[in-house]
């Protein structure tokens, strides 16, 4: 596991952004000064969660409407029943750092 630099904190708008780090497709969400990172691919069907609408701490999959808690990755509604991976995130010198397995394994 390694802390990888996802980019400058001020480069990320409110809501979701897709970030690819070490072969991982990630959905990075910014709410105010807080950042959350989950796997970008819905566990129900192949869809990008970073493109979904964010409601408080839940992101809605744009394909079938399943909602996931961005803090835990746990689905909040059907049709998804399996969680998506979550990743530790921290700010370091105004950079968003994400802890990922740097072995090149792709999620989803």
Image (cartoon, grey):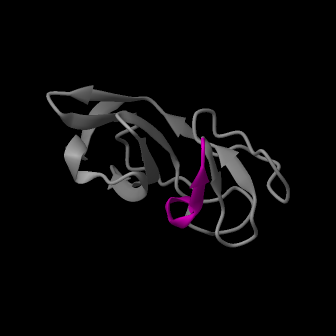
Depth check: 55 or 45 in front?
55
Q: Is residue 51 magenta?
A: yes
Residue numbers of the magenta segment: 49-56
Q: Which x, y percent locates residue 106?
A: 48, 54
Total marks placed: 0
Q: Residue at the spot x=76%, y=70% of the render?
A: 64
Residue found at the very far bottom of the displayed protein = 63
Q: Residue at the spot x=85%, y=56% of the render?
A: 78
Q: Which x, y percent locates residue 53?
A: 58, 61
Q: Residue at the spot x=45%, y=47% of the render?
A: 29
Is residue 62 visible in the rendered image? The answer is yes
Q: State left or right for residue 88 relative to residue 57.
A: left
Is residue 8 visible in the rendered image? The answer is no
Q: Residue at the spot x=47%, y=52% of the render?
A: 27
Q: Which x, y percent locates residue 46?
A: 64, 69
Residue 75, by quadrant, is top right
Depth check: 81 or 35 in front?
35
Q: State left or right for residue 15 relative to residue 33.
A: right
Q: Which x, y percent locates residue 86?
A: 55, 37
Q: Is residue 102 above or below residue 99?
A: below
Which image quarter is the N terminus in? top left
Q: Is residue 26 above or below residue 53?
A: above
Residue found at the very far left of the displayed protein = 93
Q: State left or right for residue 105 relative to residue 96.
A: right
Depth check: 91 or 14 in front?
14
Q: Is residue 31 above or below residue 16?
A: above
Which image quarter is the C terminus in? bottom right
């Amino acid at each position: 596991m390694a802390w990888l630099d996802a980019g400058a904190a001020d480069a990320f708008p409110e809501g979701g952004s897709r970030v690819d780090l070490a072969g991982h497709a990630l959905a990075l969400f910014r709410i105010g000064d807080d950042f959350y990172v989950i796997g970008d691919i819905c566990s129900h069907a192949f869809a990008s969660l970073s493109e979904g609408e964010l409601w408080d701490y839940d992101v809605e999959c744009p394909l079938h409407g399943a909602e996931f808690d961005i803090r835990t990755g746990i689905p909040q509604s059907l049709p998804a029943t399996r969680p998506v991976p979550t990743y530790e995130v921290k700010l370091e010198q105004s950079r968003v750092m994400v802890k990922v397995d740097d072995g090149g394994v792709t999620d989803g």
